[in-house]
Amino acid sequence: MKWSPNKSLIIYAFLIGVIAYLTPQKLNWTESYSNQHSWPYGAKAVFERLEDLFPENQIIINEESLFTGVGDSTLENINFVFINNNMNMDSLDFDQLLKLAESGNSIFIAANQFDKVLLDTLDLSIDLGGDLFQLMNLKDVDSNLKLDLSYVNLDSLFKFKGDTFISHFVDEDTIVCDLYHLGGIGESGNSVFIEKPFGEGRFYLHSIPLVFTNYHLLERDNNNYIERVFSILPYQRTYWDEYYKVGSQIGGKKSMMHVFLSEKSFQWMYWLSFLSLFLFMLFHAKRRQRMIPVLEPPKNESVIFTKNIGELYYQNSNHADILNKKINILKEYLSRKYFMHDINFVEHEIQTLKEKTIHKEEYLRSLFKEINNVRDGMNLSNTQLKKINQMINQFYTRTTITTKRKIDV
C-alpha cells in the first residue's frame, strides 16, 4: 500500500497532541477570584462553600454591571458579594452601589485596593504600610490573622502562610463612631475586616481578598474562617459578582474563547489544529495546482494577409486588375471622407476636391490624368503601375497630414 504524506502529517499532529496532553502542566498562580477557576487563587471552592452557607436562598451569579444588570435600586434584603484584587467602578455603577446600600441591602467587598470615592463616602482611609502578612509564598512561615465577631465570645486565630504586605482600615470620622471592627491582624489588632452602616443597609469591607481563594480555603481549618466571615451577612438572597473580576476582557464578562483558551490543553489543541490545517493546505495545494499555460497575445494577421494577396497579384502580372482595385479603393475613400460619390476623375471634380483636401490643383490634375490614361489600358507595365501607386499613396499621405494640421489649428 502506498504511504500518503497526509497520513504522516495526521499521525505527527496526533502524537504531538498526546504528548502535550500528558505533559505535566505548570500550576497557574493567577489571581482571578472567579467561581469558574479551580487553580490556587481562583474562588470555585469558596463559591461552593457559599452555596452551603445559604442553602435555602438563591445564589445568583451576576455577569453584568450594577447599572445595567441590577438597575432597580429599590431592591431590598439582598447580599452583594464582590471579591477582587481592586474595587474600581465608573460613576454610574458607583451611584447604583450606594443606592442599593441605602435601600437596605448588604454589600460585602474584599479587595486590596478600594476606590477613593468609596473610601471618602464612608469616611475611611487605607494604611498601605501595614503589617507583613505571610500570604503568598509557599514557605512554611505562618502569620496569625485574628478574627473578632461581635456575637462570638471567643477570639479565633487562623493561620495563613506566604508573604505580602497588606493594608488595613482607618476610621477618619472622629465624631460619629459607627465603624465596627470585625477582624484584625495578629497581636497588632489592625482592622482588616470592618462593618460600616450606610442608609438602611451596611458595607462589609475586607482588605485581604486572597484568604477567599481555593488555596487558603483548603489549608488547615481555614474553612471555618470563611464560614464565620460570611455568617455575618444576613440569611437572604445573594448576588455573586463575576463582572468586575481582574483580568476580564470587558469589565469582567469573559468571552467563550477566553474561557476556552484559559485551559492549557485546549490551547495546545487550538494551535495544533491551526498548524495542521496550514500544513495540509500548503502541501495539498502544492501537489494539486496545475501549471498555468503561457498564452501568446493574438496577432494582427490582416496586414500580412493583405501583403500576401498583393504579392500574388503582382507575381501573376495582372497589373490592370491591381490598378482597378486601387482606384476603387480611392473612390470609396473619397466618397466616405469627402462625400464625393461616383467620382469619375473628370475636370470639374478637380476644383471640388481641391477645396475639400487643400491639395494643389497641379497635383490633382496630374493624378486624374494618370488615372484616366492607365485605367483603361489592357497592357500595363510595372513602371506605370508603380508610378500610379506612388501617386495614390502620396494622396493619402498628404490628406492625412493636412487633416492633422487642421485639427491642431
Image: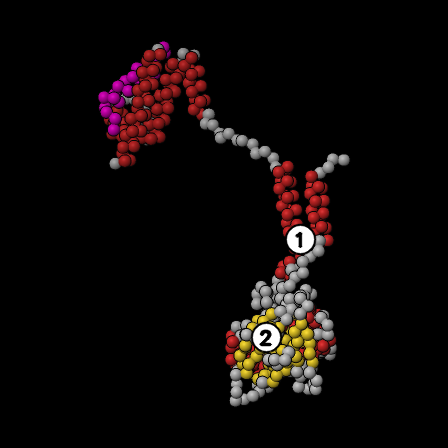
Q: Is residue 332 magenta?
A: no
**Local secondary structure at mark 1:** helix
Which quadrant would residue 361 be assigned to in this image?
top left
The boundaries of the magenta stretch are 358-380
Return the x and y of residue 195 as percentages of the image width and height.
61, 83
Does residue 201 appear in the picture of this structure?
Answer: no
Question: For the point 56% across and 32% down, which residue is it?
Answer: 293
> To which residue does mark 1 refer?
268
In the orientation shown, which residue stands out farthest toward the bottom?
Answer: 175
Which quadrant would residue 264 be assigned to in this image?
bottom right
Which quadrant would residue 189 be assigned to in this image?
bottom right
Residue type, label 1: Trp
- Work out which quarter of the rendered image holds the N terminus and state it: top right
Question: For the point 56% across and 88% down, which residue is it?
Answer: 177
Residue type, label 2: Asp
Q: Is residue 228 above or below residue 243?
A: below
Return the x and y of residue 238 as percentages of the image width and height.
66, 77
Return the x and y of residue 395 as percentages of the image width and height.
30, 24
Does residue 178 appear in the picture of this structure?
Answer: yes
Q: Is residue 373 magenta?
A: yes
Query: Looking at this view, is 392 or 407 the one in front?
Result: 407
Is residue 306 found left or right of 128 in the rendered image?
left
Is residue 253 found left or right of 231 in the rendered image?
left
> To which residue does mark 2 refer?
131
**Local secondary structure at mark 2:** loop
